[in-house]
Amino acid sequence: MEKSNGKLSLGIDIGGTNTAIGLVAADGTVVRKESIETARHGDAAAYAKEVATVIRRVAGEDLKNLVGIGIGAPNANYYTGKIEYAPNLSFKGIVPLVDLLKAELPEVAKIQITNDANAAAMGEMVYGKAQGMKDFVMITLGTGLGSGIIVNGKLVYGHDGFAGEVGHAMLIRGGRRCGCGVRGHVEAYCSATGIKRTAFELLAETNATDSALANKSFNELTAKDICIAANQGDEIAKQVFERTGEWLAQALADTIHFTSPEAIFIFGGPVAAGDLLFNPLMAHLDEYLLPVFRGKVKVMASGLKPGDAAIVGAAALVM
Amino acid sequence: MEKSNGKLSLGIDIGGTNTAIGLVAADGTVVRKESIETARHGDAAAYAKEVATVIRRVAGEDLKNLVGIGIGAPNANYYTGKIEYAPNLSFKGIVPLVDLLKAELPEVAKIQITNDANAAAMGEMVYGKAQGMKDFVMITLGTGLGSGIIVNGKLVYGHDGFAGEVGHAMLIRGGRRCGCGVRGHVEAYCSATGIKRTAFELLAETNATDSALANKSFNELTAKDICIAANQGDEIAKQVFERTGEWLAQALADTIHFTSPEAIFIFGGPVAAGDLLFNPLMAHLDEYLLPVFRGKVKVMASGLKPGDAAIVGAAALVM
């Protein structure tokens, strides 16, 4: 059993398929974790009951000594404690998850929720490379493009709890259709999905039948495939990351103009492309910036471990 | 003489031509003001001495009871108290204005400086329509496009004091050359200068020799002329504001996605166009927004009086 030094917290990462629940130590390591299926729960109350049961098992005797429970979930609102109309979750409408869990776990000091990218930003600040920083931005590249903005040591939630949607800033007027329906948003270009779309755009432009990317369907090809192909020297795959880096440079420049962060951290599968992504990104960043910002902002891969980052980020919310 | 109720402050507005110095009452009215020429001072120390002399005259016996002195100036840095490389001011390089004034006025409780758009945001919060709001954005339309971002009741300065440059977010990739040298920034389209450029773009497109705008040179025509012509029904002038409103909608949508403000206030000469600007702006705003933000954010003209806004905003900095 862990020593209950008052610095243990519990993180919950809610995804469309699974919910991961982990006990997190003061140094950010996951002491113990379990996972349940989110997907089979159409009913939020039954889901909350199962989550509470697993929390009791994972936390054990440390439950009442936890700093708190932090939850990261799509479309979660920090202010209301609710998940609101999450398109990829099985329970629909507005789910008051924090209140449901508080009723199940009255002995827990605090329970808080936010969206997954905000949770990742908190994780970076408490356990990752942003320790000691007061102004930074976290960008998460996945199916979508999420972001968490930290100003003066605090997450920016905004008036209604929904701030930090860098993925829905405009990149190219009238461009690709974004998941939200609007044309040209950053997410449609720089997310893992956007990277795949870029690959097919390039195949269409070049008719490169000899590219490794030319042998998989739109529904089969992943950003990971493109990453592997690029690292093996595939020209089309390398160009995909060239374009992605240049687009991301514009998006990060906009971000810098808004909140002037000390650093921007990038998290997610496409970060594995390494220099293939970061070199064009850094080569183009200054082109879009006011002189006063040039060469000043650190842009780097997140310091969170991919496997546990979501749990650890959620746990950081209450630290 | 005013009653020294501890709520008097002094605001200084530094412009390229003149410096205005005013004593501001608790209700935001300017009790007394004077103006000196900024332009004839190449030497910052001599300038600070003259400013201090005028401050003593304007504040009178209230000097030692002031809450403080707030200064709004281009390229001013809140953290360092310095004006840094302001292209339109006669004193060059880095000017430690706050330290210079503190040396001249040791009896003043506090002296703070920020850029003019940040000062305007503080003015709106303390004396204008943003009273009681914790999350809002101020946009100032002038030669450039300035902005002050308030998050959780505080100005966002960012890591180095230069946050809040909405004018230098990207509007149209590869578009018009901005004053900063980068192509396509918001400022090149939506500032008063941008509005004039749009007029000439439209004249070039349409060859509208019968427009009232066709009789003035590029250096003669002002946003005010275009505003007057639009109000008199000139078709080209009306189209100028249609385009400006649509572009501004995109810029404000980006702003909303970043910090999710309760309201956005617009200040400056072009606001006089009224519905000609605000109707297309509001008609297009939702087109660029995530559904969760649509129809929620108030966009309106600033509540600050044009004449004294800069002094009042600067004074608000210390309130």
Image: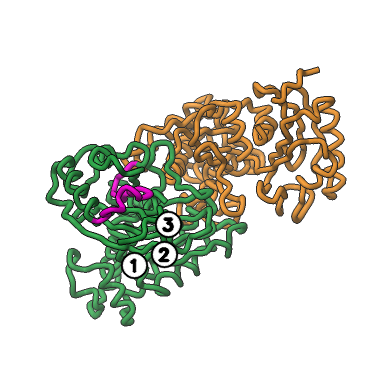
Chain colours: A green, B orange
- Circle 1: residue type: Pro
Neighbours of disc 1 within 10 Å: few (<14), some (14-19), many (20+): many
First to last magenta residue range: A58-77
Residues A95 and A197: in front is: A95
Residues B317 and B248: in front is: B317
- Circle 3: residue type: Met
Q: Is residue A61 magenta?
A: yes
Q: Which mark is residue A302?
A: 2
User: Relative to A156, is A31 above or below?
Assistant: below
Residue B317 in the image, given as x and y percentages of width and height: 65, 36
Neighbours of disc 2 within 10 Å: few (<14), some (14-19), many (20+): many
Secondary structure beneath dot 3 equals strand
Question: Which chain is disc 1 placed on?
Answer: A
Secondary structure beneath dot 1 equals helix
Question: Which chain is disc 3 placed on?
Answer: A
Q: Are marks 2 and 3 in contact (CB under 8 Å)?
A: yes
Count of labels in the image:
3
Furthest-bottom residue in this view: A232
Return the residue at label 3.
Answer: A138
Residue A319 visible to an observer of this rendering: yes
Write the residue at 43% across / 65% down: A246
Q: Which mark is residue A270?
A: 1
Residue B70 in the image, given as x and y percentages of width and height: 71, 37
Real-space Cα separation, disc 3 to disc 1, in angstroms: 14 Å
Q: Which mark is residue B107?
A: none
> Which label sits in the foreground, 1 or 2?
2
Circles 3 and 1 on the same chain = yes
Q: Is residue A172 magenta?
A: no
Q: Give the quarter of the image for residue A34.
A: bottom left
- Circle 2: residue type: Ser
Residues A191 and B238: in front is: A191
Write the residue at 82% across / 36% down: B107
